[in-house]
Amino acid sequence: MAQQKEIYLTQEGLEEQRKKYAELKEAERKNIIALQEARSQGDLSENADYDAARNNQAIIAAALKEVENILNNYKLIEGEKNNLGKYITVRFLNDDFRLDPAEDEEETYKLVGTVEANPLEQKISDESPLGKVILHAKVGDKVLVNTEDGEKFEVKILKIADE
């Protein structure tokens, strides 16, 4: 059997997963009640409520399995010897990747594991093209990012902070 890959979580991400697990368990409990009520209606072959409850049961079971996998295989990001869980401010050095080439563009990202990644919240995965190169970078480093579509751009690490 293949060894399970560690799933990196911040303390905040771990709390979110535990909350999600509790919510899914509650949804599962409510769905069991809905299934029992639908069964009591008699003929199951044309029972839309029963079909809906069964479909919902499958969705909840899959989501629960995913969260259980995360909770059984996570590694808490604390005192890592890399930049996981830290806020990293970078300056984009290539004109092609700036919104306005006349301006020095700086962005701050929180480097997290894949489960917590959310670009809309400026949380990037350690497995993303940018995340991979800033994972072990230090302030002042210039690093080359190779995107998945073959593009390249360079960033300079301006600041690394815990918050």
Image (cartoon, rainbow, N blue to C red):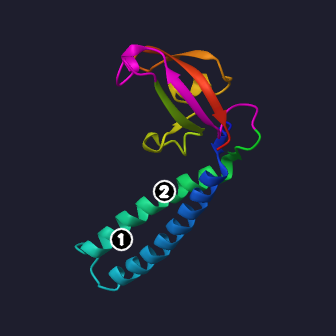
Which label is found at residue 44? none
Q: Residues within 10 Å of mark 1 (few under 14, many from 20)?
A: many
* SS state under label 2: helix
Residue 1 at what x, y percent from top left?
Answer: 67, 38
Residue 148 at what x, y percent from top left?
Answer: 44, 21
Q: Can residue 150 be seen in this view?
A: no
Q: Main secondary structure of the magenta part?
A: loop
Residue occupying the point 25% across, 72% down: 48
Toward the front, the furthest residue is: 102
- Kind of residue at disc 1: Ala
Report the span colored magenta: 80-104
Q: In this view, does 17 lie above or below 44?
A: above
Asked which quadrant contains residue 149, the reply is top left
Which label is found at residue 63? 2
**Mark toward the start of the polypeptide (1 vs 2):** 1
* SS state under label 1: helix
Q: Nearer the viewer, mark 1 or mark 2?
A: 2
Q: Which of 25 and 104 is in front in this view?
A: 104
Residue occupying the point 68% across, 41% down: 162
- Return the residue at label 1: 53
